[in-house]
Image: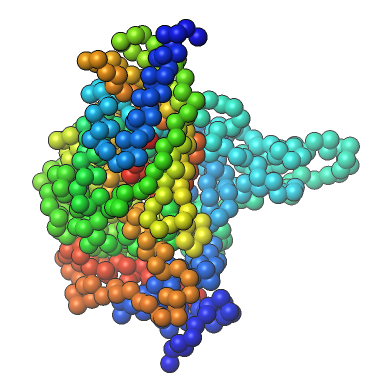
């Protein structure tokens, strides 16, 4: 029997995990509201999810030149992602090894070394400690700097998408992404892609999982939440978002593939480049694609959106991180990706459509954030736990996946199902209870 | 300062106060009528740079990068029944100050910089959002009226502390 008088805060971590095992039932379509609002669950999440899995830290095109660097957050810790003078990309903990001061406070730049503002220790952008002020005088002649190098972070990339992890035992990135790579090829590897400008950042009073949940599987909400877009004639109909496929793979990854599309959503002149980077099957998906919305577990969502702006069809490709700040707050960080070899006019129009639809001022974006905020408020505190409020995730439970789709994963032949959310929460639960 | 420039400064202060009032009163049509058909309306992403390197905002990425057609889409959208982000509308209070007339050609063109602070309150939330920054505006004189023909809003935060920009800056 499940306890009725639950207070996770007073429980040990192990008891809280036992409670999750009993109460979170992804396969039954039962997800407690408290997952979005309980501080104890948030703390366990930090340890069991964010310190364990691969997390997105940026795109290789953000540091194209030798000595370029960006600073990013990795599970709450600032890291420097630097391209060394040897061209290699490294991840370094943004902390002076001498006394712990933050080394670099800029978002991005070009530097071959970093000097600590506290005592002036100097570090090369490969992490080596190369300078200690007054070293001989105050540390003596035998002082060994070699043990003072910056802490290195395990990083890896797939099709330009850079990930890092604090977990030295984590499986290789390619294994973690698994079959999902087939779809990421279409998203980020269809052509040489580059990020436009710096990422946009804004804060929402929302639990991070609501964003991931929304992108991994919630095509259903577009009819209502984004009803204004239909009214404006930017997409054809309210049920536009139903047609296509919902697909998930192992490790909680999932996406929604909007098809078919009578129009080619990408620059026509790059068809040869797409063909050379994709398999025939992937290229076929690309040709029929009207949108693609998904989430790489845990918190990197992505989107290809094809809409009509000023009477002309245009697509934009973006990725976004739902970076947790606290149980009820996240920073949303969005990057626009464009084909490097697209015309400047196409790039300009793609950026225009991105800013209009999915930037902080975006007319899709802003209605979502309103929903995320209110859900978080309703799920916060002790009451949802005491009353055991549970969300229904049973949509599509009666349906069988299709067998004849050309891509990998578990595939359903329209997008209005919650199979992907169930898959997301299954992997989340596996990590939380591991 | 010449009397002519004093009067012109006063005129643009009043223009900006009226604009603030129209936006705070959710009179989007009234606001839209203040805009020049060739308007360029942008809000670059602010970034943290090393030292005093400038500009410390992006020339490539923006939170707004609109012309009159896109602004019309936003205004039209806010008038549908589905613009949830502003249903019910935020209560906003725009304070405009430090208004400086940088260039002035009577009955022709003017460049005006000002500071803007937007207080935003939504629903029952006791927490408010503050959005502050500098406006770099250009005005063109058309048919006896000054119309806003260019606005660049340099926001003070690199991470915006507001859930969205469903409001105008």
Question: A358 above or below B21?
Answer: below
Q: Position of residue A420 (x, y in %)?
A: 30, 66
Asked where in the image residue A346 lies, by quadrant, the reply is top left
Front residue of A429/B43: it is B43
Question: A410 above or below B140?
Answer: below
Instruction: Answer left or right for A174 relative to A138.
Output: left
Residue projecting furthest to the bottom:
A1
Front residue of A414/A352: it is A352
Instruction: Answer left or right for B15 relative to A271.
Output: right
Answer yes or no: is residue B25 visible: yes
Residue ID at (38%, 21%): B12
Residue projecting furthest to the left:
A262
Front residue of B113/A182: it is B113
Front residue of B107/A72: it is B107
Residue ID at (64%, 51%): A151
Q: How many numbered marks does the figure carry?
A: 0
Question: A170 above or below A96?
Answer: below
The quadrant of the rendering that contains the N terminus of chain A is: bottom left
Instruction: Answer left or right for B33 relative to B112.
Output: left
Residue ID at (88%, 40%): A138
Q: Position of residue A224 (x, y in %)?
A: 21, 58
Instruction: Answer left or right for B10 relative to B74.
Output: right
Residue ID at (37%, 61%): A374
Answer yes or no: is residue A337 visible: no
Q: Position of residue A204 (x, y in %)?
A: 43, 53
Q: Position of residue A24 (x, y in %)?
A: 40, 78
The colouring scheme, among rainbow, by chain, secondary structure or one colour, is rainbow
């Amino acid at each position: 029997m499940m306890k009725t008088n639950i207070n996770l805060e007073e429980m040990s971590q192990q008891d809280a995990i036992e409670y999750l095992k009993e109460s979170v039932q992804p396969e039954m379509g039962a997800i407690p509201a408290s997952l979005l609002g309980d501080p104890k669950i948030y703390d366990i999440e930090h340890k069991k999810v964010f310190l364990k899995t691969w997390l997105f830290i940026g795109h290789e095109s953000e540091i194209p030149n030798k000595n370029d660097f960006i600073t990013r957050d990795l599970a709450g810790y600032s890291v420097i992602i630097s391209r060394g003078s040897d061209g290699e990309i490294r991840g370094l903990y943004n902390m002076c090894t001498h006394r712990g001061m933050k080394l670099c406070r800029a978002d991005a730049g070009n530097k071959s070394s970093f000097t600590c503002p506290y005592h002036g220790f100097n570090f090369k952008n490969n992490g080596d400690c190369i300078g200690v002020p007054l070293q001989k005088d105050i540390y003596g002649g035998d002082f060994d700097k070699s043990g003072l190098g910056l802490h290195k972070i395990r990083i890896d990339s797939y099709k330009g998408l850079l990930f890092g992890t604090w977990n030295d035992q984590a499986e290789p990135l390619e294994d973690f992404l698994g079959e999902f790579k087939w779809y990421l090829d279409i998203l980020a590897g269809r052509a040489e892609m580059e990020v436009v400008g710096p990422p946009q950042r804004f804060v929402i009073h929302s639990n991070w999982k609501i964003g991931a949940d929304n992108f991994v599987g919630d095509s259903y909400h577009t009819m209502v939440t984004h009803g204004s877009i239909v009214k404006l004639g930017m997409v054809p109909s309210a049920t536009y978002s139903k047609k296509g496929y919902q697909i998930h793979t192992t490790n909680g990854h999932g996406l929604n593939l909007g098809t078919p599309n009578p129009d080619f959503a990408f620059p026509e002149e790059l068809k040869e480049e797409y063909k050379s980077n994709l398999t025939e099957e992937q290229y076929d998906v690309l040709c029929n694609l009207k949108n693609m919305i998904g989430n790489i577990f845990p918190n990197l969502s992505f989107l290809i959106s094809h809409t009509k702006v000023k009477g002309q069809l245009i697509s934009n490709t973006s990725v976004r991180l739902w970076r947790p700040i606290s149980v009820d707050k996240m920073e949303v960080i969005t990057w626009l990706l464009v084909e490097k070899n697209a015309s400047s006019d196409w790039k300009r129009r793609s950026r225009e459509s991105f800013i209009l639809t999915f930037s902080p001022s975006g007319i899709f974006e802003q209605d979502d954030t309103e929903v995320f905020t209110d859900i978080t408020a309703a799920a916060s505190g002790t009451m949802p736990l005491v009353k055991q409020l549970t969300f229904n995730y049973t949509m599509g439970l009666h349906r069988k996946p299709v067998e004849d789709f050309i891509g990998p994963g578990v595939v359903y032949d329209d997008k209005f199902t919650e199979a992907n959310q169930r898959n997301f929460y299954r992997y989340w639960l596996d990590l939380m209870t591991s | 300062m010449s009397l002519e420039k004093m009067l012109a400064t006063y005129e643009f202060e009043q223009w900006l106060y009226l604009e603030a009032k129209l936006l705070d009163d959710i009179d989007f049509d009234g606001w839209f009528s203040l805009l020049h058909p060739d308007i360029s309306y942008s809000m670059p992403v602010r970034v943290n740079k090393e030292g005093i390197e400038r500009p410390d905002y992006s020339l490539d990425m923006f939170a707004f990068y609109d012309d009159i057609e896109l602004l019309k889409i936003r205004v039209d959208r806010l008038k549908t029944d589905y613009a949830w982000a502003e249903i019910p509308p935020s209560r906003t209070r725009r304070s405009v100050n430090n208004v400086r007339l940088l260039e002035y050609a009577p009955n022709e063109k003017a460049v005006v910089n000002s500071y803007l602070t937007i207080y935003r309150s939504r629903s029952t939330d006791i927490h408010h959002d503050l959005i502050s920054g500098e406006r770099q505006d250009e005005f063109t004189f058309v048919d006896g009226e000054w119309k806003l023909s260019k606005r660049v809003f340099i926001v003070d935060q690199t991470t915006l502390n507001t859930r969205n920009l469903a409001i105008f800056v």
